[in-house]
Amino acid sequence: MNIHDAYRPFLGYFRGARNARFVSMVNLLPETTVLDVGGTAQYWSSMPVMPRVTLLNLERDQNTDLPQIVGSACQLPCEDKSYDIVFSNSVIEHLGTWENQKQAASEMVRVGKRIWIQTPNKGFFVEPHLITPFIHWLPRAWQRRLLPYTIWGLIAKPDAAYCDGFMREIRLLTLPEMQSLFPGHPIIREKFGFINKSLIAIGTS
């Protein structure tokens, strides 16, 4: 069983609502230029409006005709304010360290006339990558020991090297940290019931 199959129904529900909000709030048009940092062509195939999207990733995707830039979120190879919107969905938490996250946030604000940067909320009780409650609130040494026994671990059966890489890569963000990364930008709280499930930094750069 593929790990994504386990939570695809939930992703579809939240993503549809998020995309509708995005289109409405930024007045997305076909001529809007968007730099999607860490994104995929598949994500945009479900968007109600298809803007002029350029994907930026560390490696080129051979399965899409969308324009692509090979580069790092921490050093965007783009001119200041060269895109109408810099967009990023569940990427900034994969940059490993606070310093990397600060650098990427600064770069996205520099390049975009506006930004839309979404990330899971560390304050939400379920760790979204592991589909497991509370584990991300434990000390990191405990997280590493328990990682193979999370729902994700039991399905994916990762080896020790993969688990170590996961621990180096994922650093979830809190609401105060997002406010610190994007000062002066409103932070939307995307809710599950009464709890903030994810956080979205928006607004004019």
Image (cartoon, rainbow, N blue to C red):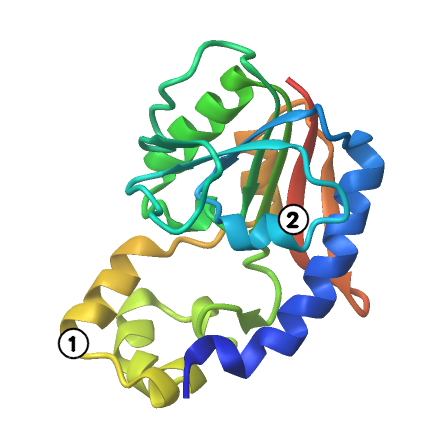
Q: What's the residue type where badge 1 is placed?
A: Ala
In the picture, the disc for residue 1 is: none
Residue pictured at 36% horizontal, 19% vertical: 77
The percent position of residue 40, horizontal first and vertical second, equals: 48, 49
Q: Would residue 131 be visible to someone looking at this image?
A: no
Q: Nearer the viewer, residue 62 or 110?
A: 62
Residue pictured at 65% horizontal, 48% vertical: 199
Q: Nearer the viewer, residue 172 or 40?
A: 40
Q: What's the residue type where badge 2 is placed?
A: Leu
> In which quadrant of the rendered view does residue 184 lie?
top right
Residue position for label 1: 160
Q: Is residue 138 left or right of residue 134?
A: left
Q: Would residue 126 be visible to someone looking at this image?
A: yes
State whether residue 133 is above or below residue 63: below
Q: CA distance from mark 1 to mark 2?
A: 31 Å
SS at mark 2 in the image: strand
The residue at the far top in this view is: 80
Which part of the image, by quadrant, shows the N terminus? bottom left
The percent position of residue 54, horizontal first and vertical second, equals: 50, 32
How crowded pointer 2 is (Cα within 10 Å; few <14, some 14-19, many 20+) is rated as: many
How crowded pointer 1 is (Cα within 10 Å; few <14, some 14-19, many 20+) is rated as: few
Residue position for label 2: 199
Q: Is residue 179 left or right of residue 61?
A: right
> In which quadrant of the rendered view does residue 24 lie?
top right
Q: Is residue 104 left or right of residue 21?
A: left
